[in-house]
Amino acid sequence: MNFADLDWRVLDRLRSTFLQEKFGSTGYWQSPRDLAQYHVSFGERIGWKWDAVLEELRDIGWAPPAGVETMIDWGCGSGVAGQRVLKAFPSLRRAAVGDSSPAAVEFALQGLRREHPGIESKAWSGTDASGGLLVISHVWNELDPEQRVQLLQLAGTAAAVLWVEPGTHETSRDLQTVRDHFREAFDVLAPCTHQGPCGLLAAGMERHWCHHFAPPPPEVFVSSDWSRFAVRAGIDLRSVPYSFLCLQRRPAGAAPASDDGWERILGRARISKPYARTLSCGVCGVCDTEVPKRQLPDWFKTFKNGEEPRRLRWIRDGDRATSVEQP
């Protein structure tokens, strides 16, 4: 399917469902056509978020632990997340997909078998992810409290977890709570640079949240199809916010992963004429840092252009940056 085949009656209904969070007990996929429409449009934008997450994991040298060869895509939808993860990690040899919608499971399986014919793939409806990489994408706000507990129990059995959600304030802060829930048994490898309590959950930080922005592929900005889609859907192609977690089970008796001293930039900088201000999180907590235009013109320009590096280390005088280091 391509953009010429988009049915806006379907897409408008799906988008309204997502925005209003009225998912109902039967879900929102009414037919395989719904999934195909979603996959090439809104689903592809979710794929950009996964691309950003997987690139960051490559940058820090992370891959599924040795011996982990099975990916479990929980709440698979059209299978966007699973396809991206399998492409990123060739060590994965098997894939299992699960969803409350049988149509979604079948659509996702067809996509996996087409895109990754060498991977053994099957439907999955288990409650134990032992030895596997559990992939979770854009499901949290669809779950009731009991289902959330069940998902956390499932995640607690996995060897590793990759979890991506929208970058909204509420969902992101929920994911920060999930992060702290698991840090006794899992190492938190991204986006965090430390294993301590989440600094954004401290008193006085309630208005902040851990979110990031995925860059769309450059060709999107010269595509008339995507331009028309953005206008019709009422979205900004430049703004693709997300939040995420990468968790890896800690061997019994092992010490937590060491803190590397870097800070992770959160969101985007606030720009004024003389300086930019950035919010970053590290082992020492959450820091609001002033980047003076006169003293650090290149870094000021970087933040003004929305090109925030993922990780850095500020050298500060008070809350003012005097220099910066990158990994």
Image (cartoon, helix red, strand yellow):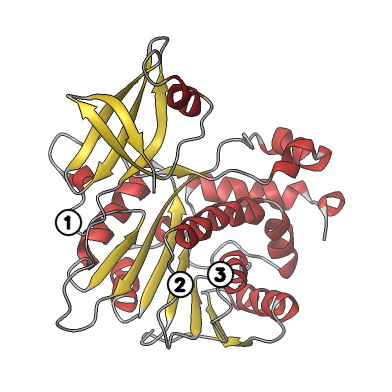
CB contact under 8 Å: marks 3 and 2: no
Label 3 SS: helix
Distance CA(mark 3)–CA(mark 2): 10 Å
- Mark before the other along the chain sequence, 1 or 2: 2
**How many numbered callouts?**
3
**How many C-alpha atoms fall within 10 Å of the one at disc 2: few (<14), some, or many (≥20)?**
some
- Residue linked to disc 3: 85
The answer to whether residue 258 shows anywhere in this view is yes
Q: Is residue 232 left or right of residue 245?
A: right
- Mark before the other along the chain sequence, 3 or 2: 2
Foreground of the two, 159 or 137: 159
Q: Which mark is residue 196?
A: 1
Q: Is residue 141 above or below residue 326?
A: below
Distance CA(mark 1)–CA(mark 3): 27 Å
Say which amino acid is labelled 2.
Answer: Ala
The percent position of residue 153, horizontal first and vertical second, equals 28, 76
- Residue linked to disc 2: 63
Q: Quadrant of the N terminus?
A: bottom right
Say which amino acid is labelled 3.
Answer: Val
Q: Is residue 313 left or right of residue 5?
A: left
Q: Is residue 120 left or right of residue 36?
A: left
Going 20% across and 36% down the picture, which residue do you hit?
205
Going 70% across and 52% down the picture, which residue do you hit?
41
**How many C-alpha atoms fall within 10 Å of the one at disc 3: few (<14), some, or many (≥20)?**
many
Foreground of the two, 109 or 219: 219
Say which amino acid is labelled 1.
Answer: Gly
Label 2 SS: loop
Going 35% across and 72% down the picture, which residue do you hit?
151
The percent position of residue 209, horizontal first and vertical second, equals 32, 41
